[in-house]
Image (cartoon, rainbow, N blue to C red):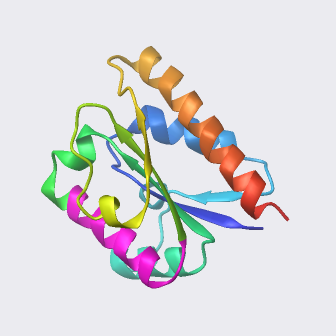
Amino acid sequence: MPQIFLAHSSEDKEYLDTIGDTFYGTDISIYIASRIMEPKPPLKKVVVAIETSRALFALVTRNVANHRDTRDWVTFELGYAEAHSKSIFAWVAEGIEPLEVLKYLTTYQPFEDAEGPMAKRKAAREIARQMYNIAVSQYST
């Protein structure tokens, strides 16, 4: 089963739940590191997951852009995916500056990072649909 790695902030619960639900039970797996409890150190877990994935999807929200540790992790994940010749696709919330590395690696799709859980879930459904369509068209077995 093809796997996609999702670079994200663990604080984006509505997005992560919706994206995870979209891929659940399909022939494409999405790896959401903050949801996987493994005994490996975080770096090892992420490196192995990126190496075994077909592509990296990056969800860049205010929670990524405004938290240095998260921004550093996502930047590392993007760089590691590029170094291992993985396809990279990104969604960047409107109103925030994209991560500098994204400008060199891929184009990105802007999205409205809506306020409130219902509005976030609606935006997340659209992003999840786009992610799933890309994954199916390029990686489905």
Q: Is residue 38 above or below residue 119?
A: below
On the image, the x and y values in percent for residue 32 come to 50, 57
On the image, the x and y values in percent for residue 124 come to 51, 31
* Residue drawn at x 54%, y 81% as measured from the top left: 51
**From the viewer's perspective, is 49 left or right of 105?**
right
**For this rendering, which residue is in front, 92 or 115?**
92
- The quadrant of the picture occupied by the N terminus is bottom right
**From the viewer's perspective, is 102 left or right of 91?**
left
* Residue drawn at x 31%, y 59% as measured from the top left: 103
Q: Quadrant of residue 20?
A: top right
**For this rendering, which residue is in front, 111 or 42?**
111
On the image, the x and y values in percent for residue 67 come to 16, 50
**For this rendering, which residue is in front, 1 or 75?**
75
Is 108 magenta? The answer is no
Q: Main secondary structure of the magenta part?
A: helix
Give the residues drawn in magenta, as a range.
70-86
**Residue 102 seen in the current view:** yes
Q: Quadrant of residue 127?
A: top right
Q: Is residue 133 above or below residue 129?
A: below
Q: Is residue 134 above or below residue 74?
A: above
**For this rendering, which residue is in front, 15 or 86?**
86
* Residue drawn at x 32%, y 18% as measured from the top left: 115
